[in-house]
Image (cartoon, helix red, strand yellow):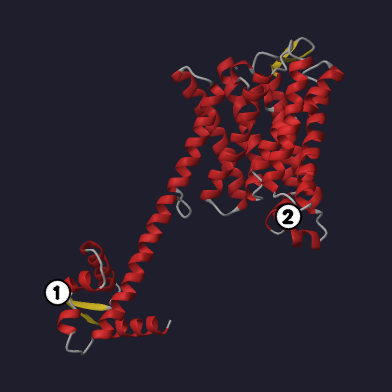
Amino acid sequence: MTPQLEIQVIAAVTAAACALVGAFLVLRKTALLSDAISHAILPGIVLAFFQTENLNSPLLLVAAAVTGVVTVALIEALGRTQLVKQDAAIALVFPALFSIGVVLISRYASGVHLDIDAVLLGDPAFSWIRRFEVGGRDLGPQALWLMGSVLVAVAAFVVAFYKELKLSTFDPALAAALGLAPTAVHYGLMTLVSVVAVGAFDVVGSILVVGLMIAPPAAAWLLTDRLPVLLALSVALGVVSAVAGYWLARGLDVSIAGAMAVVAGVVFTVALAFAPDRGLVAQARRRARQRVAFAERMLLVHLLHHEHTPEAETECRVGHLQEHLRWERSFASRAVKAAERGGAVRRSGDRLALTASGREAAQRAMVA
């Protein structure tokens, strides 16, 4: 593979791992934990590096996972005191742990690649340089092997514990009653979040990790209610964000990680606007239909109230609705047309009259 293709594959695999594990964070409404974990694991990485003096040591992943679990435990312990809410607990724990990591880096590791910019921002353009070699044979970028292994681990965890994850995500009380150990599943998931975050540091940095964990699953959640489809769609949107971000960066000669974040944000924005059921456009149309439906009921009640009265000749005319019901001409026309389509009223010129079904609908509306 060419370096350009390797960069895209590494970014796509990283995005897939982030999106798959992030989908459960979004569903559990604990998306803030991704930000907390991706930053708070820094001191664990630094301390492991001090022990191994090797950025490629698997001990860094182990230390990051342990630190991530400790972070979640501290946040939940603070929350259980009921003295602070969860978001406040997150804001207290992760800045403290992250600051410890920053201080350790700046004080003891400023001369190595483990620097603040690399941890925060990452650079996919250099992810292909370090190679994985066996017996002098080049087997590809180390980052691809690392993130490929992480993705396989995440996928295996989801497949092996799919039932437990599904039930503990949507009904933890029932999961506990059935003996499915939702707490153990929760901490297993948080461990994977930590592993994914540290594995992606060199590729995209901790800031973009959060974006890739949250934006694609959030967009997928707007598009579907089925969990299997949501997981697949999250991964697909993450891969699209990574690959499209790479080409956007090449075209504009800008940061690759930044371009990926932009594309992920655009993907979410499009889903937010145009999702079939939950999108803003769909909601606006639904509210408009509800306004017209309510106006139609008001129209039927109005006609019933004035039916067979001396004022009927005036009150039951379309032009009078603007004065009596304070409706604009266009809105009154929409309400009348909706009532006509439903067979509730007959129109003769400007004069309106209830049909039998319209009269029954008006009476039901008055009773309700």
Q: Examine the rendered structure and indicate whether residue 336 appears above or below residue 232.
A: below
Tell me, yes or no, if residue 151 can be seen here: no
Q: Residue furthest front?
A: 83
**Circle nearer the N terminus (1, 2):** 2
Q: Residue furthest left?
A: 349
Residue 256: x and y in percent read: 54, 22
Question: Which amino acid does the dot numbered 2 rest on?
Answer: Ser
Decide which of 205, 340 is in the foreground and name it: 205
Residue 45: x and y in percent read: 78, 25
Decide which of 190, 94 is in the foreground and name it: 94
Q: State how far apart marks 1 and 2 are (Cα).
A: 60 Å
Category of crowding for the residue at label 2, using alpha-carbon neighbours closer than 10 angstroms: few (below 14), some (14–19), many (at least 20): many
Task: Please give the label number shown on residue 168.
Answer: 2
Label 2 secondary element: helix
Residue 93: x and y in percent read: 74, 38
Q: What residue is rendered at 43% in x and 47% in y?
A: 274
Dividing the picture into quadrants, the one containing residue 129 is: top right
Nearer the observer, disc 1 or disc 2?
Answer: 1
Which residue position holds label 1?
350
Category of crowding for the residue at label 1, using alpha-carbon neighbours closer than 10 angstroms: few (below 14), some (14–19), many (at least 20): few
Quadrant containing the C terminus is bottom left
Dividing the picture into quadrants, the one containing residue 150 is: top right
Label 1 secondary element: loop
Tag count in the figure? 2
Residue 128: x and y in percent read: 64, 17
Q: Examine the rendered structure and indicate whether residue 260 appears above or below residue 312.
A: above
Dividing the picture into quadrants, the one containing residue 97 is: top right
Tell me, yes or no, if residue 272 can be seen here: yes
Q: What residue is rendered at 56% in x and 40% in y?
A: 216
Left or right: 60 in relation to 229:
right
Left or right: 14 in relation to 135:
left
Question: Which amino acid does the dot numbered 1 rest on?
Answer: Asp
